[in-house]
Image (cartoon, rainbow, N blue to C red):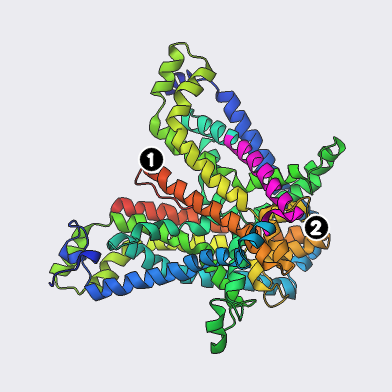
Amino acid sequence: MTRMKRRVLPGFPLSLGYTLFYLSVLVVIPILACFSKAGSLTAAQFRDAVWTERTRAAYALTFGTSFAAAAVNLALGLLIAWVLVRYRFPGRRLMDALIDLPLALPTAVGGLVYASLYVKKGWLGQYLAPLGIQAAYSRLAIVLVLVFIGLPFVVRTVQPVLEDLDAEAEEAAASLGATRWQSFRRVILPPLYPALLTGFALAFARSLGEYGSVVFVSGNMPYKTEIAPVLIVARLEEYAYGEATAIAVVLLVVSFVMLVVINALERWSRRSEAHA
Amino acid sequence: MPETPPVLAPPSRFRHAQQDPLWLRVILVLAAAAVVGLLIVVPVVHVFAGALSDGAAAYWRNLFGDPDTRHSILLTLTVVPGALAANIVFGLAAAWAIARFRFPGRTLLTSMIDLPFSVVAVSSEQKFVLVFGLQGYLGPFLQSHGVKILFATPGLILATAFVTFPFVARELIPVMQAIGDEEETAAVSLGASGWQMFRRVTLPNIKWGLLYGIILCNARAMGEFGAVYVVSGHIAGQTDTMPLRVEKLFQEYNLPGSFAVASLLTLLAILTLVVKVFLETRVSPERRHVH
C-alpha cells in the first residue's frame, strides 16, 4: 500500500541508478581492484610484502601512536565535553566552535604548523628542548599531531550524552550522602562509557589512516618514525604496486574491523541511551 | 553554600547536586582552555605569524609572485568545484532515492553512505585503493579513449570526489526524511512535472541542509592531501594543489612561502567554521555531528 503511494513521486529509477553507478565507479570497483591486485601475488609474495621487519616496525608505530593519541584524546575529550556542558563561562561558545577546527583545517596545514612549533627554536619546542623532550621528528611528534587531528571525536560523542543525563540520579546520590567524586565515578561516568568508547574508536580509526599531517612531523625514518601509509607511498614511488597494494589490503582489513567495532559500539550507545 | 560569582554561575536548571565547588570549576575550565589554546589556538596564530614573518609585501609576493604557487591556487579552484558538483548531484540523487522510496538493499546503501566507515575509513586507507583501481582497470580503458587520469586534472577531481563523496548525501538524507513527502506528492498530483516539483518544492525545503553539506564537503575537498598526493604525481606547476604546494615549499625550506599558502587554507577553515555555526542554528539547534 505504501509502495503504491510512494511511487507517485517521480525520479526513482534515475536517482537510484545514478547513485549505484556513482558508488560503483568510486568505491566498489576500486576496492575490488585492490583485492584482486593483491590476490595476484602468491601467498609467499604476499607474506614477504606485508611481513618484513620494516613493515612490522611501521605497523607497530602506526598502531602504537594511534592508540596513544586516542587514549590522550579520551581524557582531554571528557574534560572539554564536561566543561562545555556543565559550566557557563565567557568564551564557551568560542571554545565549542574551535573544537571542530581540526576537522575543517587541511591536514597538511596541521602538519606544517606542528612541525615548526616543536622544533628546537620553535614557539613551544624551545621550552621542551631544555627538558630533553624532542617533540619534532620523533614518535612524540606523531602522537602530538594525532591528538590534534582526533580531538573533536571524543568531545562530540560525549557532549550530547552528557547533556541528556538526568539530574535526578545525581541528586539521589547526593542526598544519600555521596561525595561529588563518588557520584561522578559511580553515577555520571558509567552512562558515558559507550560514548567514550565510540569516540575513542573514531579517533583511533582516523589516526590509523592519517597521512597528510604525519609526513610533516615524523621525519619518516625507516624502522623508527615511518608509519604504514608512508610505507605504501614509498613502495608506490618505487613502482612496486603489488607490495604497496598488499600493505593497503592489510590496512583496509583492519579498518573494516574497526568499522564493525564502531558500529557495534554505536548501537550499544544508542541502546543504553534509550534505557536511561 | 557560598554565593557563586556571576562569571561561572550556572543557569538555574542546574541544581545543587550537580554543582561543583568554585575552585574545581575554575581549575577545570582553565585546564580545558589550556588544552584548546595549546592544541588549536597557538597553531592557528602560528600559521599567520609564519606567513607574515617577512612583512606584508613578502607575504603577497609569496602568494602571487611564484608561478607554481599561483598555479596551485588555480588548480585547487578547478578541482574542488568539479568534485563538489559531482558530489552534489550524487548527494541529491542518493538522498532522493533513500529518503523517498523503499527498495531492497536500501539499508545497505544507507550504511555505505552514512556509517562512520565512509567518514573515517574512506578518507584514509581506501584513498590508496583508488589509485590501484584507476591504474589497473579504468586507467588503460580511459587512456585508450584519450582521457588521461593519473597525473592529470581529471584524476585529481576523481580522487577528491572519492574522499568526500558521503558529505552532501549524509546531510540531506535526514533532512529529507524529516520533511516528509506530503508537499511533493501534492505538487505532483496537482500536475507539476518532476523538475518543477524539485525546483519549487524540494529545493527550497532542503536548501540549508544542502548548503551545510556543501560547506563540509568543500572544506574536506580543499584540504585533501593523501589521495591527491598519490594520484597527482606531485608535479610542481602542473598537478600540485594547494595542500601539496604547502608540502613542497616546506621540503624546499621555503617556510614563509609554505606558511603563506597554509594561511589561505586556514582562513578557509575558519570561514567554514563560522558558516557552519551559523547554519547549525538554522538547520536545527540540537544537531551535532561527528564527521
Q: Residues within 10 Å of mark 1 (few under 14, many from 20)?
A: few
Instruction: Check disc 2: other Cα within 10 Å, few if <14, some if 14-19, many if 20+.
Output: many
* Residue at 70% across, 46% down: B74
Question: Which numbered circle lies on residue A101?
Answer: none
- Residue B98 location in percent, x, y? 50, 33
> Which amino acid, by three-letter code, is at mark 2?
Tyr
The residue that label 2 is drawn on is A241
Q: Residue at x 44, y 38 (%)?
A: B174
Residue A245's place in the image compared with B87, above or below, is below
User: Magenta region: which residues?
Assistant: B62-88
Q: CA distance from mark 1 to mark 2?
A: 48 Å
| View extreme (top): residue | B191
The answer to whether residue A233 of the structure is visible from this angle is yes
Q: Residue furthest right?
A: B144
User: Could you say which quadrant of the image residue B20 lies in?
Assistant: bottom left
Helix, strand or loop at label 2? It is helix
> Residue A214: percent from the left, percent from the top?
63, 67
Q: Residue at x 67, y 54 (%)?
A: B242
Q: Is residue A175 left or right of residue B269?
A: left
Q: Which residue is mark 1?
A: B282
Q: Between residues B170 and B97, which one lies in front from this camera angle? A: B170
Number of numbered markers = 2
Quarter of the image where the C terminus of chain A is located:
bottom left
Please state which of residues A194 and B93 is positioned toward the viewer in this rendering: B93
Query: What percent of the width, then of the height, locates residue A152?
Result: 46, 60
- Image check: B43 left or right of A244? left
Q: Is residue B68 magenta?
A: yes
- Quadrant of res A1: top left
The image shows residue B277 at horizontal and vertical percentages of 42, 48
Magenta span has B203? no
